[in-house]
Image (cartoon, rainbow, N blue to C red):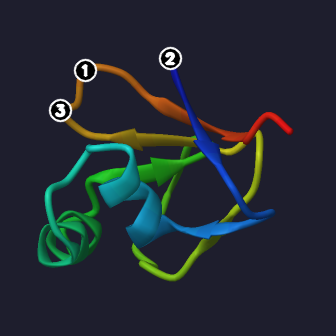
Amino acid sequence: MRDVPIRDEVIRLGQLLKHSGLVDSGAEAKHVLAEGLVTVNGEPEVRRGRQLRAGDVVVLDGADDPVRVTACPA
């Protein structure tokens, strides 16, 4: 599992997919979500605007490893 630190308290799922390198663009994020290829904490998720917080785990089907949202060190 790979940790992905975020600056703020929350990040939207579409932004996290790009920030973590799981997808290359917002259009690709929209596509993988529409295809049902993303889970958050083990549950399928299709909302690009889903707000994620530290501790949430995101998995993209076919990706090497899941990513876990973490708070940026102070």
Kindly report the distance in space between the C-alpha atoms of the residues bearing marks 1 and 2: 9 Å
Q: Is residue 10 above or below residue 71?
A: below
**Where residue 42 sits in the image (x, y, percent)?**
57, 41
Kindly report the distance in space between the C-alpha atoms of the residues bearing marks 2 and 3: 14 Å
Which tag is nearer the camera, tag 2 or tag 3?
2
Label 2 packing within 10 angstroms: few (<14), some (14-19), many (20+) = few
The kind of secondary structure element at disc 3 is loop
The kind of secondary structure element at disc 1 is loop
Residue at image mark 1:
64
Which tag is nearer the camera, tag 3 or tag 1?
1
What is the quadrant of residue 16 in the picture?
bottom left
**Where residue 74 sits in the image (x, y, percent)?**
86, 39
What is the quadrant of residue 65 in the picture?
top left
Q: Is residue 16 above or below residue 56?
A: below
**Where residue 63 sits in the image (x, y, percent)?**
23, 30
Residue at image mark 3:
62
Q: Amino acid at mark 1?
A: Asp
What is the quadrant of residue 71 in the picture?
top right
Label 3 packing within 10 angstroms: few (<14), some (14-19), many (20+) = few
In the picture, measured across the screen, residue 39 lies left or right of residue 57, that is: left
Residue at image mark 2:
1
Kindly report the distance in space between the C-alpha atoms of the residues bearing marks 3 and 1: 7 Å
Q: Residue at x 80, y 63 (%)?
A: 9
Given the current orientation, which residue lies at the most extreme front position? Answer: 74
**Where residue 39 sits in the image (x, y, percent)?**
46, 50
The kind of secondary structure element at disc 2 is loop
* Nearer-N-terminus badge (1/2): 2
